[in-house]
């Protein structure tokens, strides 16, 4: 496993945890203050975690600069996550329009917790796609 | 029906002909990572023209001696 692959794997895990946490919180406490608090705590924890991951990965693998293949993999992963975000956004708009008469569904689909969960999910998809491309290879 | 083009390469052979040069050494010479050299050798990645020229220059040969196009039916 290359240096870049290890770093990407390190980024992937907290994003999955973040997505799962916000999805799980959808049915719990939904106040804006607790949402803001959760985001701040998670972002601070993520930064600390990523610093530790960078130090550990640099200690076990020789740091390498990004080259054209790394950039191509990043570009393709961004395309996949953008497509997923567009599909989710279309589905979300459709659900809002269709589910409008059912207040409990509307409440769920307008929850800011869901938006944050989707953001974490799309980022997890992006890094996950990068990991897949690192394994199976990529062509322009 | 248009035949599919595949880029074949002689990077592995040329490395061994140049004093058993390691993938890491070649990667450093051409400004790429070892993983990229490995992927090129395995035919899993077709490099950009710039990197292809750099690889050819590293071996002191022409581009066509390193990379060759092959046509596969279907």
Image (spheres, rainbow, N blue to C red):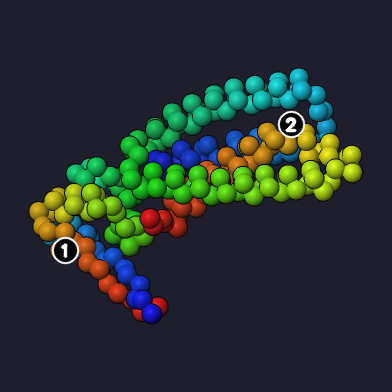
Which residue is depicted at the point 66% across and 25% down?
Answer: A39
Q: Is residue A18 above or below residue A35?
A: below
The reply to whether discs 2 and 1 touch (Cβ–Cβ < 8 Å) is no
Q: Would you call the spot at circle 2 few (<14 residues within 10 Å), some (14-19), or many (20 or more)?
A: some
Q: Would you call the spot at circle 1 few (<14 residues within 10 Å), some (14-19), or many (20 or more)?
A: few
Residue A71, by quadrant, is top left
Chain label for disc 1: B
Q: Position of residue A66 (x, y in %)?
A: 35, 39
Considering the numbered disc 2 on the image, is that residue within a helix, a strand or a loop?
A: helix
Q: Nearer the viewer, residue A111 or A123?
A: A111
Q: Position of residue A135 (x, y in %)?
A: 45, 54
Considering the numbered disc 1 on the image, is that residue within a helix, a strand or a loop?
A: helix
- Give the mark count: 2
For label 1, the residue is B64
Which residue is depicted at the point 54% across and 24% down?
Answer: A48
Taking the image as shown, residue A89 lies to the left or right of residue A103, namely left
Taking the image as shown, residue B61 lies to the left or right of residue A71, namely left
For label 2, the residue is A112
Would residue A4 be visible to someone looking at this image? Answer: yes
Q: Position of residue A140 (x, y in %)?
A: 38, 55
């Amino acid at each position: 496993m290359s240096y870049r692959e290890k770093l990407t794997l390190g980024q992937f895990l907290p994003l999955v945890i973040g997505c799962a946490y916000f999805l799980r919180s959808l049915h719990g406490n939904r106040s804006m203050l607790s949402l803001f608090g959760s985001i701040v705590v998670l972002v601070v924890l993520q930064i600390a975690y990523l610093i530790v991951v960078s130090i550990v990965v640099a200690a076990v693998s020789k740091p390498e600069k990004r080259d054209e293949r790394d950039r191509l993999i990043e570009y393709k992963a961004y395309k996949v996550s953008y497509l997923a975000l567009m599909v989710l956004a279309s589905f979300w708009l459709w659900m809002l329009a269709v589910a409008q008469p059912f207040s409990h569904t509307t409440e769920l689909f307008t929850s800011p917790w869901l938006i944050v969960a989707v953001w974490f999910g799309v980022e997890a998809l992006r890094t996950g796609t990068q990991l897949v491309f690192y394994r199976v290879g990529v062509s322009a | 029906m248009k035949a599919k083009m595949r880029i074949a390469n002689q990077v592995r052979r040329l490395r061994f002909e140049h004093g058993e040069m390691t993938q890491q050494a070649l990667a450093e010479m051409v400004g790429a990572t070892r993983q990229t050299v490995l992927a090129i050798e395995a035919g899993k990645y077709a490099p950009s023209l710039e990197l292809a020229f750099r690889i050819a220059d590293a071996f002191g040969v022409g581009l066509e001696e390193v990379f060759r196009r092959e046509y596969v039916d279907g």
